[in-house]
Structure formats: C-alpha cells, structure tokens
Amino acid sequence: MRKIIFITILTFAYSFNLRKAKQNYDSYVMAVQWPNGYCSANNCGKKADHIYKNTMTIHGLWPSLKNGKYLDTCTSGVTIEEDDTKLFADLKQYWPSFSKPNTAFWEHEYNKHGYCMVEEYEWDGYEEYFEFVLELFLSNYKDLIIKAFPNHSNGAFVVSYEEMKEKIRKIIPNATFKMNCNKKYIYEFYFYLEKDFNPSINSVFTNSCNSGILVFN
C-alpha cells in the first residue's frame, strides 16, 4: 500500500503518496457536471429523473498541461468489473454516465486519465484513483452550485460568466475554471489545479459559453 502523507487544499486535507513524477504533466483539470443543465440540453432518459437534480457529478480528474493541451491517453487497458462495495455505490451516485453504461464510462476515465496518476503516485490500482477523486469532489464540488445560488429553484434563470466566477470564488478562493454550454445551458465546469491540487493561476483556457447571458437551469 502507498505511504500516506497529508497536504491541504483550501481548508480540506487529502491523503496520497507524493513521489517523483513519472508523467510529463504540470497540472490537473477537475471536470464536474451540472446535470440540471446537461439534461435540459440532452435527453438523459429515466436515469436522470430527479436522481441527480441540484447536485454536481464527476466527469473526471485529468492530468493536464497549463498551456491548454491535454495528455495523450494513458492506455492501461484495464477492465473494470462492478461489485457491491461502497466504492461502486459511491461511483454510481457521484460519477454516473448519462450517455453510456457506467462501467464503460469509468473504464474510459481511468484508462485515459487515471492510470497516469496511479503510475506517478505508485498506487495499487484504479480503486485508489477513484477513491481519491471522490474525496476531492465531495469536499469541494458536490454542492458548489447550490452553495453559490442558495435560492436556486427548478426554474431556469440567466447568469453571466462574471457573476458565476464571483459566486464560485466566494466558496473556492482564486478558483480558475471554464464553463461548457450546450444550447445556452451551463452543463459542465473545468477547474484548473496545480500539482498540489490548489487552484491554478496560469492555465490557458477558453470558455465555450462566456459571450453574454447564459441559461442556468
């Protein structure tokens, strides 16, 4: 098992093994979805029928580069078999897929992104990657939109990128992020992080929905 040390990101502590980097990346992207907006622009079917309303879900944690480029696929080729452990119960709740089977989604995220981190930190396998991302998400991002907009209701309203940035930075100081939109609905946020998982201040990115008033559902 990995040796354990503690670092602090904002007011939260996370445990993982910091070892000499084996991958050529200098930052991370924490991608979180807002199912309200995603399902307003896409047909999610019964899966999203109020189960994920008013909470964020995970897209992934991706080793990245501050110049805006992403790493090539890590390519581990691991097959994930779901079981009845707490890990998979948490994955189904906080890391669901809205377009493909959950296991296919988790395999994609691990084989493309997570394996790089497992190699770097010398973790035992995909379980530790998923556990780490879940801990990071639950401590920082799960209730982010509800905290930013406590009077949010199920009705649609409009918000600018600057207003969103101001709201989120009151919760996560110095947060650096982009928003993704589809049909004017905000559906996803990419949070840019340093290698110590604090907000990055030098990342290059372009919002897909920063041109005026946006529909927030």
Image (tube, rainbow, N blue to C red):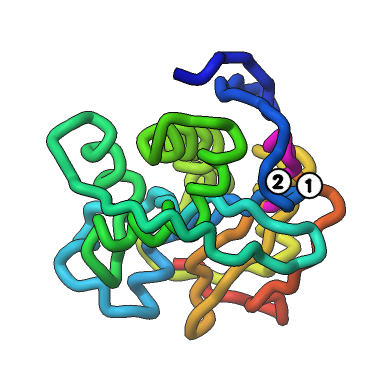
From the image, tell me which residue sits under label 1.
200
- How far separated are the C-alphas under marks 2 and 1? 5 Å
- Asked whether residue 193 is drawn in magenta, I would say yes
Name the spot of residue 69 as percent of width and height, x first: 72, 68
Name the disc covering residue 61, or none. none
From the image, tell me which residue sits under label 2.
193
Name the spot of residue 183 as percent of width and height, x first: 48, 85
Residue lying at 27% horizontally and 53% vertically, measured from the top left: 79
Q: Is residue 41 left or right of residue 145?
A: left
Name the spot of residue 22 as percent of width and height, x first: 67, 42
Farthest-out residue, bottom: 183
Q: In this view of the protein, which residue sits in the foreground, 188 or 213?
A: 188
For label 2, the crowd category at 10 Å Cα-Cα, with few meaning under 14, some 14 to 19 and many 20 or more, is: many
Residue 28 in the image: above or below residue 154: above
Residue lying at 47% horizontally and 60% vertically, measured from the top left: 75
Name the spot of residue 36 as percent of width and height, x first: 38, 63
Residue lying at 72% horizontally and 52% vertically, measured from the top left: 25
Q: State which region is magenta.
A: 192-198
Q: Are marks 2 and 1 in contact (CB under 8 Å)?
A: yes
Name the amino acid type tagged 1: Ser
For label 1, the crowd category at 10 Å Cα-Cα, with few meaning under 14, some 14 to 19 and many 20 or more, is: many
Which quadrant, please, contains the N terminus? top left
Which quadrant, please, contains the C terminus? bottom left
Image quadrant where residue 46 sits = bottom left
Q: In this view of the protein, which residue sits in the foreground, 63 or 56?
A: 63
Give the dominant element type of the magenta stretch: helix, strand or loop.
loop
Residue 123 in the image: above or below residue 27: above
Look at the numbered disc 2 and give the secondary structure of its residue. Answer: strand
- Asked whether residue 147 is drawn in magenta, I would say no
Q: Is residue 70 left or right of residue 1?
A: right
Whether residue 217 appears in this view of the structure is yes
